[in-house]
Amino acid sequence: MNTIRTSVLSAVLAVSCAAGTNTLAAEGEFKLPELPAKLDKSQAGYYRVKIGDVNVTALSDGTLLLDPSFLHGDRKKIDSLLTKNFVKPPIDGSVNAFLIEAGSRLILVDAGTGTLFGPAANKLPASLRAAGYQPEQITDVLITHIHTDHSGGLLVGGKMTYPNAVVHVEKRELDYWLDKQQMAKARTEQKRFFTEAEETMRPFVSANKIRTFSGATELFPGIRSIPAYGHTPGHTFYSLESKGEKIVFWGDLIHAAQVQFESPLVTILFDADPAAAAAARTKAFADAAANSYYVAPAHMSFPGIGRLRKEGAVYRWYPVLYINDAHTGSR
């Protein structure tokens, strides 16, 4: 096995499938399995929907693997739900970003993994181009949080992937991950996030390309931030409303939909505050189900857009229906 320089989360999401392999070494260092230099096929992915008058395009950054052992909760129930949903470990998880066409602005929600997560990821630039856009056209990037499967794609090989974009992020999120005192007292599995945040975000701070906000803020007409703290100290949703329709981009509210829609209190190892993360999920699920708007989680199976309905004590996911680009009828 080879050790790949990456965030600890990437190690969690790209665990070894070999029986008996221990992904956590004694000194707290995760090990990744050997990976091919490249995949046989590099597959971009995009899918368009319309929210009122606004075009939204789901963009695939590829997929990662999740080891179910990092889900925290009733172990028997977690395993039972995976079996019920025909899922065998490890769980394949999508990495989704979303493009909003807001007048003269092209706004990207999250920036993908960059080169930090191996050959099955880093598809976002290709997906963007396949959808008809160039990275240089992006005017703004909204970061839900600074884990590097959401921000790592901002800077690749020392170059800004979206050189003309301003990066928007919750102030408490940026302050936390760039704080060396916070890094010193962080849990072992969190420390690399700080190092990678410094490497990824600091160049944008130095170039005056970051704009921070605090709490619920209207960032652009019809586009607002929604505090959803817990997974990280400044984890943030973004909502888009147009002509009476709405979509909320959920970031890392969900990591294993097969489990968490039926057991919202199940958390993951990398939640900074598991209780707050579970509370944010419970609140978001209830609101989405009660008001029937679209939601877009970052790690839902691509394209990752759908609605929720509450059925008894659990939630059911109703994905957006596939419509060919040539078809302009109602969704």
Image (cartoon, rainbow, N blue to C red):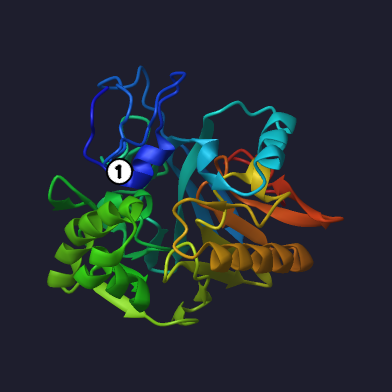
> Where in the figure is residue 78, as x and y percent of width and height?
66, 40
Q: Is residue 112 left or right of residue 221?
A: left
Q: Which residue is the extreme one toward the right? A: 312
- Tag 1, which secondary structure? loop
Neighbourhood count class around disc 1 (C-alpha, 10 Å): few under 14, some 14–19, many 20 upward: few
Q: Which residue is the extreme one toward the front? A: 26
Q: For residue 153, say whether it is visible.
A: yes
Q: Which residue is mark 1?
A: 28
> Where in the figure is residue 46, as x and y percent of width and height?
48, 41
Residue, x 71% and y 37% (percent of image)? 81
Q: Work out which quarter of the rendered image holds the N terminus and state it.
A: top left
Residue, x 60% and y 67% (percent of image)? 280
Q: Is residue 130 or residue 158 the one in the foreground? A: 158
Tell me which corner region of the image, top left, top right, bottom left or bottom right, holds residue 257: top right
Q: Is residue 54 left or right of residue 166?
A: right
Residue, x 14% and y 45% (percent of image)? 157
Q: Is residue 302 left or right of residue 64?
A: right
Q: Is residue 306 or residue 163 the one in the foreground? A: 306
Q: For residue 129, say whether it is visible.
A: no
Report the label total. Answer: 1
Q: Is residue 166 left or right of residue 127?
A: left
Tell me which corner region of the image, top left, top right, bottom left or bottom right, holds residue 176: bottom left
> Where in the figure is residue 300, as x and y percent of width and height?
57, 45
Residue, x 73% and y 47% (percent of image)? 318
32 to 13, vertically: above or below: above
The residue type indicated by label 1 comes to: Gly
Q: Is residue 15 or residue 309 the one in the foreground? A: 15
239 to 327, vertically: above or below: below
Q: Is residue 27 or residue 247 the one in the foreground? A: 27
> Where in the figure is residue 173, as x and y percent of width and height?
35, 71
